[in-house]
């Protein structure tokens, strides 16, 4: 499996139906944020250390209470929807590949395979997974999914906070792209699909989700502002994910590499993770050196799924972790706790192309 994401995407595009590729690849509005995410990561600059022993570079990371996880890699798989559009095994293949690579997997509410089957695919290789939550018009529908995820072994919930409405995509998918059996894989028969539409969330929903899940930690995804991060953590969130939904919600939103430092300062030592445009080992290094504890990847995992199923996902994630080992050695860091001292900063010459 190629480590070159542009080549991987090219191969996936050849395999996918054009409308499926556009659905996965596209962003909202003029796709300014979609492009700016990647550009911002490429503008990060490092100050590598020298004369350090990097003969044995370790990528393991421990997430403390209440998440309580030990992971082989700080690279995690972000929640993305409708994986059966890319591969017949859908999320089962993605989850299995991620688990075999030692990567945390986050299952989307919009999964095309059952929660229980995906959980079994993760458990086989001894992996771990979280469940991503959208609040839907029929709140009991959300509650039932959350309780099923908790019963199946999800170790945390990821509340997506940046979808009060769904962003209008530049590459609008045709009606009927998602077939009913896939859309309803976890929702069951419904008389009115309007009950599945998203509603805005509030700080109170952090506690509500913790309560209905039997006490699972809640991670809030979609945070770009320092004051929002502080409010989420004060309301009981276990961590926040700096994210602009991969450029699929508010266009011209801040690239995540630029938003991350202020959120970290507001979090005051509490866990902060990041996603958005992460494509290379250098991007991962940048996120970790800026202070994120986990770096999530989204679209490249879908390209790997389309090209090679579970084996493709594992191979790409293994390759990205191997790449991280290489750039950590070049940076003079033998373990993740040595990365924040690299004083990574974003090049002040950065301009987001429009």
Image (cartoon, grey):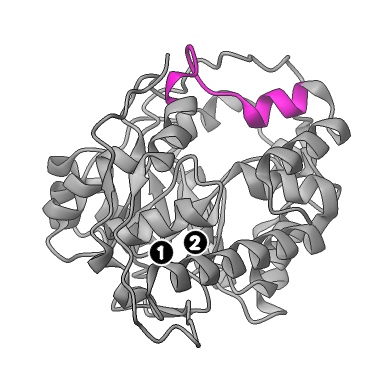
Say the numbered circle drawn on residue 92.
none
Across and down, in percent, residue 170 comes to 57, 13
Q: Main secondary structure of the magenta part?
A: helix
Say if residue 101 shows up in the picture: yes
Tell me what residue is drawn at x 44 percent, y 19 percent.
Answer: 32
Across and down, in percent, residue 309 comes to 82, 55
Q: Would you call the spot at circle 2 few (<14 residues within 10 Å), some (14-19), or many (20 or more)?
A: some
Specify whether 293 is left or right of 110: left
Q: Would you call the spot at circle 1 few (<14 residues within 10 Å), some (14-19), or many (20 or more)?
A: many
Across and down, in percent, residue 61 comes to 41, 77
Judging by the rendered image, the residue that carries numbered circle 1 is 213
When the figure is inspected, residue 160 is found, relative to residue 282, above or below; the finding is: above
Q: Point out the tag, 2 or 1, that comes first from the N-terminus.
A: 2
Residue interval drawn in magenta: 19-33
Q: Which residue is more in the foreground, 127 or 294?
A: 294
Tell me what residue is drawn at x 66 percent, y 34 percent.
Answer: 190
Judging by the rendered image, the residue that carries numbered circle 2 is 147
C-alpha separation, residue under disc 2 versus residue under disc 1: 5 Å
Screen quadrant of the N terminus: bottom right
Q: Quadrant of residue 312?
A: bottom right
Say if residue 117 shows up in the picture: no
Q: Quadrant of residue 104?
A: bottom right
Q: Which residue is more in the foreground, 26 or 107?
A: 26
Tell me what residue is drawn at x 64 percent, y 29 percent.
Answer: 25
Tell me what residue is drawn at x 12 percent, y 52 percent.
Answer: 266
When the figure is inspected, residue 267 is found, relative to residue 19, above or below; the finding is: below
Screen quadrant of the C terminus: top left
Marks 2,1: beta carbons within 8 A: yes
Specify whether 119 is left or right of 29: right
When the figure is inspected, residue 168 is found, relative to residue 139, above or below; the finding is: above
Q: Secondary structure at mark 2?
A: helix
């Amino acid at each position: 499996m190629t480590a070159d994401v542009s080549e991987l995407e090219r191969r996936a595009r050849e395999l996918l139906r054009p409308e499926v590729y556009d659905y996965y690849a596209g962003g909202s509005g003029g796709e300014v944020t979609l492009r700016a995410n990647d550009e911002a990561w490429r503008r990060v600059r490092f100050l590598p250390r020298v004369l350090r022993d990097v003969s044995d570079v370790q990528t393991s990371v421990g997430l403390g209470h209440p998440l309580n996880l030990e992971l082989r890699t700080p690279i995690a798989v972000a929640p993305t929807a409708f994986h059966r559009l890319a591969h017949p095994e859908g999320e089962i293949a993605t989850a299995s590949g991620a688990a075999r690579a030692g990567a945390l997997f986050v299952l989307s509410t919009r999964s095309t395979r059952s929660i229980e089957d995906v959980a079994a695919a993760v458990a086989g290789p001894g992996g771990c997974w979280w469940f991503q939550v959208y609040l839907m018009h029929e709140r009991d529908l959300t509650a039932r999914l959350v309780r099923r995820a908790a019963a199946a072994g999800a170790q945390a919930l990821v509340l997506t906070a940046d979808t009060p409405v769904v962003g209008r995509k530049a590459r609008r998918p045709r009606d009927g792209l998602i077939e009913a059996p896939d859309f309803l894989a976890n929702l069951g028969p419904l008389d009115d699909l309007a009950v599945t539409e998203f509603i805005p969330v509030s700080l109170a929903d952090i506690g509500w989700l913790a309560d209905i899940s039997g006490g699972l930690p809640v991670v809030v995804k979609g945070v770009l502002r320092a004051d929002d991060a502080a409010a989420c953590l004060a309301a009981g969130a276990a961590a926040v994910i700096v994210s602009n939904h991969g450029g699929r919600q508010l266009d011209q939103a801040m690239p995540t590499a630029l938003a991350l430092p202020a959120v970290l300062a507001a979090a005051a030592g509490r866990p902060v993770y990041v996603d958005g445009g992460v494509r290379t080992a250098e991007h991962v290094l940048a996120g970790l050196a800026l202070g994120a504890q986990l770096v999530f990847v989204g679209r490249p995992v879908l390209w790997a799924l389309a090209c090679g199923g579970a084996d493709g996902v594992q191979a790409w994630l293994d390759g990205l972790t191997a790449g991280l080992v290489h750039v950590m050695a070049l940076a003079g860091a033998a373990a993740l706790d040595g990365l924040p001292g690299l004083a990574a900063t974003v090049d002040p010459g950065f301009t987001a192309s429009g």
